[in-house]
Amino acid sequence: MVSFEPPAAPDLSALPKAAPQLAAPEPGARSPPPPGLPANLPLTKLENCPGPESQQAGKMDACAGCPNQIICATAPKGPDPDLPLIRARMSSVKHKLLILSGKGGVGKSTFTAMLAHAFAQSPQVQVGVMDVDICGPSIPRMMGAVNESIHTSGAGWSPVYVADNLGVMSIQFLLPNQDDAVIWRGPKKNGLIKQFLRDVEWGELDFLLVDTPPGTTDEHLSVNTYLKESGVDGAVVVTTPNEVSLLDVRKEINFCKKAGIRVLGIVENMSGFVCPNCEGESQIFHATTGGAKALAEEMGVPFLGAVPLDPRIGVACDYGESFFDAYPESPACDGLMVIIRGLQDQIGFEQLPEYDE
Amino acid sequence: MSLEGVKHVILVLSGKGGVGKSSVTTQMALSLARRGHRVGVLDIDLTGPNIPRMFNVEDKKVTQGARGWIPVPVGTATENGGSICCMSLGFLLRDRGDSVVWRGPKKTAMVRQFMTDVVWGELDYLLIDTPPGTSDEHISLAEQMRTVNPDGAVIVTTPQAISTADVRKEINFCTKVGINILGVVENMSGFVCPHCSECTNVFSSGGGKTMAEQFSVEFFGAVPIDPSFNLMIESQSSEEAPLVEQYGKSKLEPIFKDITEKLVAKVNS
């Protein structure tokens, strides 16, 4: 087994027990807030934090009571020395797309895999898929590469190629056993993501699709920090039509706005289900609040399209086959083509993948 | 310690997201409350808290008592004394769309505070709903659990291999940190078409059961997809009857009755 011991984290037990505060305090807050909950919690005031790169990190008044204070105060200052290396590595990638969703299990990986296969239809387009879901990597299975492992060369780690022009990188390839759990805290996950960006020998790529885990935490912050300088085209946000999912996705779009990531659009997955027996349509994930389209309007971001729920997609994923190649006539593939055209308008890439109508 | 009056602590875990951890937690809570138990629900999914939405208490706020945070009650106690109260980060957000963008150490501190500073009072069951993965929240929870001595974890999965692959990792996590596994629930197992009553395995079927057999853990049951439960959750505010009562009419109620009976038998044995 790989050593999955948590990294030697700074001593958090030294934190005052009652202190953990919900966010960085307001600027100029001279005294610590009263015990308990203040009337309005400054939960999302990230801008008041001087930032871990600041020379003043952990030392400003605003840092008092922040659980990260000790870490910020003791960590090395200045920009990350690896950023130029990442930029150099990423300079050969034309378009970088993030696939995001606040909610789990809405089909981020499925969508990523289908999009990758769709792009890779034309042989001259080079596609890379990077799976930064450290705790639940699904991409290798969906790509039928679950038993592969990584090779290293002088130039770096070689991605696993599932087709001539489709390379994949995931932590799953580094695990000795398929079922091994990766029990890592944030800093260790960040380290691996950095390695994925810095050390993987992608070569010349037209598209790099980055599949992310659910939530708005370490992985997302890291990917954004590391890729900011190299320039990300934007993020595609995936959701299901039900409000419980939209609730989390709303948070993800807010995160993108805060982090300065352009939202290319929202994709509604699993929208509507057609019974294979009677062809009657039913809503499994009921769009009680108007679904992704209403959310897109509400948040002022484009709505890219919808992919209906098709049980064959799930089966294709389990067996690692390309749904796109197997059922090009299906409504799901039509939906996907609409989305790709929408993406094309957004980022203006020259080549639309060839598609056998 | 705020968990002194709590008889049983049960975690709801899954390596995979969107398999229905929160909805299974909700239904187990409803099912237990209908049987006269006092139930607490703690939602430690910090970046995607869904429990407030599930119980239609999104607009409620947490109040600060003399001894700590007072959880939000859901409706009133049932006739046989069952009740539900819950605690989630969702209650601490100013706006429901606000995102919580935290790195690990901050999440650790928050989980710790949830475990120690909530005044649950006397509870029969405390169900802890978790985010997907095996990372900060889970490690912190496992650390806190050492002092609490939990009864164990209920693992939720959907039937496809993509989901069970991640859930296997979660089971290995539990083994590694010494959390006992009570049983496996297979959610979204088949969908009965409302038009022709034909059952379609939208996310295939049987994966949860096979996994439970492989790891020699108990299989609690398979729960089909029922869009009407989703609608019940969404239409709570317009309904007169409390959710606990309405749930009696759901087709899923007998299934969860069976699941919770197995669960209760397991933790009391």
Image (cartoon, coloured by chain):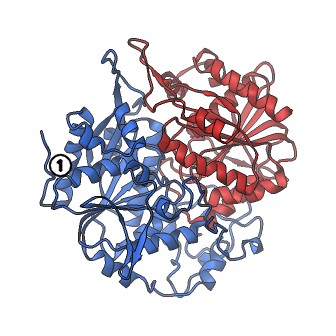
Chain colours: A blue, B red
Count of marks, rendered view = 1
Q: Residue at x 66, y 54 (%)?
A: B173
Please report, as a chain letter, where disc 1 is located: A
Residue on which the image places disc 1: A341
Q: Is residue B150 visible?
A: yes
Q: Kindly identify the amino acid type of the residue bearing the numbered disc 1.
A: Arg
**x and y, in percent, of residue B231 in the image:** 49, 25
**x and y, in percent, of residue A196 in the image:** 42, 71
Instruction: Give the quarter of the image for residue A12.
Output: bottom right
Q: Residue at x 86, y 32 (%)?
A: B269
Q: Nearer the viewer, residue B146 or A138?
A: A138
**x and y, in percent, of residue B160 in the image:** 48, 37
Q: State the quadrant of the C terminus of chain A.
A: top left
Position of B224 compared to A225: left or right? Answer: right
In the rendered image, the vertical position of residue A280 relative to residue B50, given as above or below: above
**x and y, in percent, of residue A117 in the image:** 26, 51
Q: State the quadrant of the N terminus of chain A.
A: bottom right
Q: Nearer the viewer, residue A121 or A107?
A: A121
Position of A252 compared to B75: left or right? Answer: left
Position of B185 compared to B3: left or right? Answer: left
Q: Judging from the image, what secondary structure is the residue with disc 1 in?
A: helix
In the rendered image, the vertical position of residue B93 relative to residue B183, given as above or below: below
